[in-house]
Image (cartoon, rainbow, N blue to C red):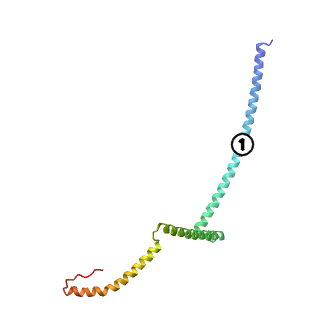
Amino acid sequence: MTTTSEKTAEKTGVTQNVESFLKGQLSQAQKRFEGLEGEANKAFKVLETRGQEAKKEVQALWTKVQAGELRADPRVQELTKKVDAAGTELRKRLDGLQAKVVEAVGVASQSQVQQITHELGRLSKKLDVLLKPTRRAHGATKNSGSAASSPRA
């Protein structure tokens, strides 16, 4: 039979084996962690460098925009033409849609109101021309003391 001292020695040996195993695993994990940390630092430095380069590019573009240099670029001119054409087409479509809505509602459009206003102004001038001699004639009768009332225009 084994004695107590042998059991204690056996336990101590197992404990030392477990302890050495755990230390080995811990050191391997620490090495992997250090490797990951190194890779993360490299990735961070790469991202930082890219960010600085992008910042410089944006600053250069902003300087060109402020100086108006981009307007001379053929690509920008082509885009400007396309945007203008799209805007014109959109205005035409909106005008057509507005005309359809006005027609459906039965309200006079702005151009129709302008035409009516113009026609009313023209007719008002003609009426004034026709009424001026009448006013003069009535004005002479008023001064003479006539009791008849004159029409007001």
For residue 52, above or below residue 85 = above
Secondary structure of the residue carrying numbered label 1: helix
The type of residue carrying mark 1 is: Leu
Task: Name the quadrant containing residue 62.
Answer: bottom right
Q: Is residue 91 left or right of residue 73?
A: left
Query: Which residue was labeled with disc 1?
Result: 36
Image coordinates for residue 26, horizontal then vertical, percent: 73, 33
Image coordinates for residue 21, horizontal then vertical, percent: 76, 29
Q: Is residue 107 left or right of residue 11?
A: left
Image coordinates for residue 42, horizontal then vertical, percent: 71, 48
Q: Residue at x 65, y 58 (%)?
A: 54
Depth check, front residue: 102 or 67 = 102
**Mark 1 surroundings: few (<14), some (14-19) or many (≥20) residues within 10 A:** few
Depth check, front residue: 58 or 100 = 100
Q: Is residue 94 left or right of residue 116?
A: right
Image coordinates for residue 89, horizontal then vertical, percent: 58, 70
Task: Name the quadrant containing residue 149.
Answer: bottom left
For residue 41, above or below residue 67 = above
